[in-house]
Amino acid sequence: MTAKSGFVDDYLAYLLARASHLISSEFHVVVEASGLSLMAWRVMASLSGKDALSVGELADIVLAKQPTVTKLVGRMEEAGWVKRCDATHDKRQSLVSLTAAGRRKVKPLLALAQAHESQVTADIGAAEVAQLKRALERMIAMRG
């Protein structure tokens, strides 16, 4: 480990961003090879295991602006990966869910993502990884 000398070496936001970039960029190669854009992967992964999410919820989860996600969902709907329907409580709100084709498309990527996470975190240990995830979840909940 190198000696800490500058501000960013101990700055949480930088460390989180750097770790995210390093880990994510390794997996992005796999996503792109599957024929999905990174944003489409994020949307499909976010919808996995859920009945449906609103476009606004998806935008929050995938860290994108709502108009961008709306356009992407339209393209994904044309590809047959997702479907939209009106929310029962508010006809102005669209709910998005994976189609059977979307679930088939994303399922192998979810397994590869989990394997990649296991590989990346193997040297840290399960207890520390779980602790890190809990701390990040708390941080997100307090600021989200």
Image (spheres, grey):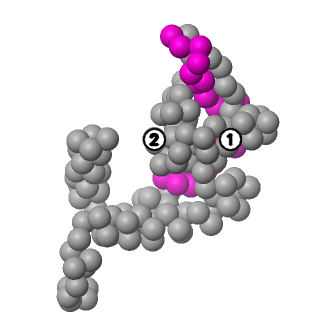
Mark carried by residue 60: 2
Q: Residue at the spot x=62%, y=17% of the render?
A: 86
Q: Position of residue 116 (x, y in %)?
A: 49, 61
Front in this rendered view, residue 133 or 59: 59
Q: Residue at the spot x=63%, y=62% of the render?
A: 30
Front in this rendered view, residue 125 or 136: 136
Q: From the image, which quarter does the N terminus lie in? A: bottom left
Mark carried by residue 127: none
Can residue 105 be found in the magenta stretch?
Answer: yes
Distance CA(mark 1)–CA(mark 2): 15 Å
Answer with the quarter of the image where residue 127 lies: bottom left
Q: Position of residue 65 (x, y in %)?
A: 53, 45
Q: Position of residue 20 (x, y in %)?
A: 41, 64
Packing grade of label 2 (10 A; few <14, some 14-19, many >=20) is: some
What amino acid is labelled 2 in the image? Answer: Asp
Packing grade of label 1 (10 A; few <14, some 14-19, many >=20) is: few
Label 1, on which residue? 71
Q: Is residue 105 found left or right of 134 in the rendered image?
A: right
Front in this rendered view, residue 25 or 10: 10
User: Magenta segment, which residues?
Assistant: 89-114
Q: Position of residue 37 (x, y in %)?
A: 67, 55
User: Disc 1 on helix, strand or loop?
Assistant: helix
Front in this rendered view, residue 12 or 46: 12
Q: From the image, which quarter does the C terminus lie in? A: top left
Q: Is residue 11 above or below residue 89?
A: below
